[in-house]
Amino acid sequence: MRQSKLFTKTAKNAPKDEITLNARFLTMGGFIYKVMAGVYAYLPLGLKVLNKIRGIIRQEMDAIGGQEILMPALHPAKNWQTTGGWDNIDVLFKLKNRTGKDYALGQSHEEIITPIAKETTKSYKDLPVAIYQIQWKYRDELRAKSGILRGREFEMKDMYSFHASQEDFEQFYGVVKEAYLRAYQKLGLTAKVTEASGGVFTEKISYEFMVLTDAGEDDILYCPSCEFCVNVDIAKQKQGEVCPKCGQGNLQQAKASEVGNVFDLGQKFSRDFGLTYTTQDGKSDYPIMGCYGWGTTRTMGVLVEKFNDKKGIIWPEAAAPFKVHLIIVDEVSRQKTEEIYATLNKAGIEVLYDDRENKSAGEKFADADLIGIPWRVIISEKTLKENSVEVKKRGEQEAKLVKIDNLAKIFHAQ
Ligand SMILES: [Zn+2]
């Protein structure tokens, strides 16, 4: 894509009302546009990043047998009244139509998927089944000021699974956990799983997927030797103590950001909606349900909070809007740069080509630092004489000279 044609331009200064780093860099770079507090539009660069994140999650959910659907954001009040959510969830976004009828904007979709499953899931032979979607969610927040980390409107992948037994749910939870950890790893994130048990109130477990980042809003204790990880708020241990699970590692404290969660829903929703199935011995029972959330827009914000420097964003390759930022710094190299751009495009490499004529090299480099595309290719008369171009990785100081003929090959190998 040619930067001269790009819908958005960069801004030198961050908007005054944005406090968080994710909102500042993403707005300055032209990734997002704030429509109102907690509600953002995703512009071409931003949508490309979001699509990359969606793609990685989709791939992992499909690989473990998840089936994708799309449920509505607008819900009848009745479904939420059936489960008690209408009165009990204070952030539930409620609205009335012109005849005074009540509706809700979904903040989760158990209220929609369970009645659907009632039509489709009748026998033990239909279980287990896992259904997911990637859809916008709404929370009636009084204040929203964390950029895209916590919005009034945000996007999530939410999956719902139905099981004939608790053991089957636990087994599937393990499968989802591995899929989540693989997806985080692809995004360059280190995730830990904390067990946020209901404790005395319920035997039901819930898990939170925490990504280690200094910008995180949670403090966790984790063991470097095993999987033990707990939120400091509910931890009985302290930093430096020996891990209670493996007895080997010393617990370390770190800041983390929650990017996913799992809830053992038990039979709550299947009972509320009368979703039953016929068991193997001909009886009727309610399936056990699990819910698996992953904030996609939030993940984009966390990536920015984690991967940046003073100059801007440093996207991990898997989430970057483009792989290569091609920059021409002098007009005499124009024709050669056009050829290189065409060659890279033909090779299927995603390139943002800064072809702008009225910008200095310094301005172009500053924009490239802000936007944060992983690889920068600089074309100048000086190196062209040696049939070479300068290649530099975002976040690294040293550039290296690469022969033009090898350029596409190098990016394919990355
Ligand atoms: Zn341990």
Image (cartoon, helix red, strand yellow):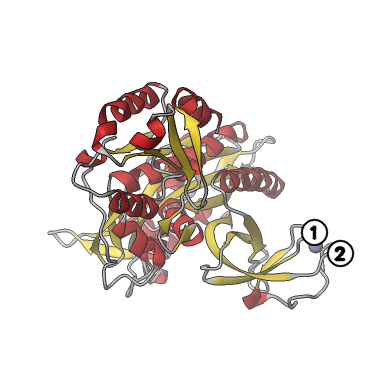
Displayed-image quarter of ligand 1 = bottom right
- Front one among 340 and 348: 340
Image location of residue 239, percent across then percent down: 73, 76
Asked which quadrant contains residue 213, the reply is bottom right
Where in the figure is residue 82, as x and y percent of width and height? 40, 59
**Vertical arrangement, residue 116 with respect to residue 25, above or below:** above
Q: Quadrant of the N terminus?
A: top left
Q: Position of residue 277 (x, y in %)?
A: 57, 40
Identify the disc placed on residue 225: 1
Q: Is mark 2 within 8 Å of ligand 1?
A: yes
The answer to which of 404 and 258 lies nearer the viewer is 404
* Residue type of the residue flagged with mark 1: Ser
Q: Are marks 1 and 2 in contact (CB under 8 Å)?
A: yes
**Which label sits on residue 248?**
2
At 35% across and 37% down in the image, what residue appears?
Answer: 380
Q: Secondary structure at mark 2?
A: loop
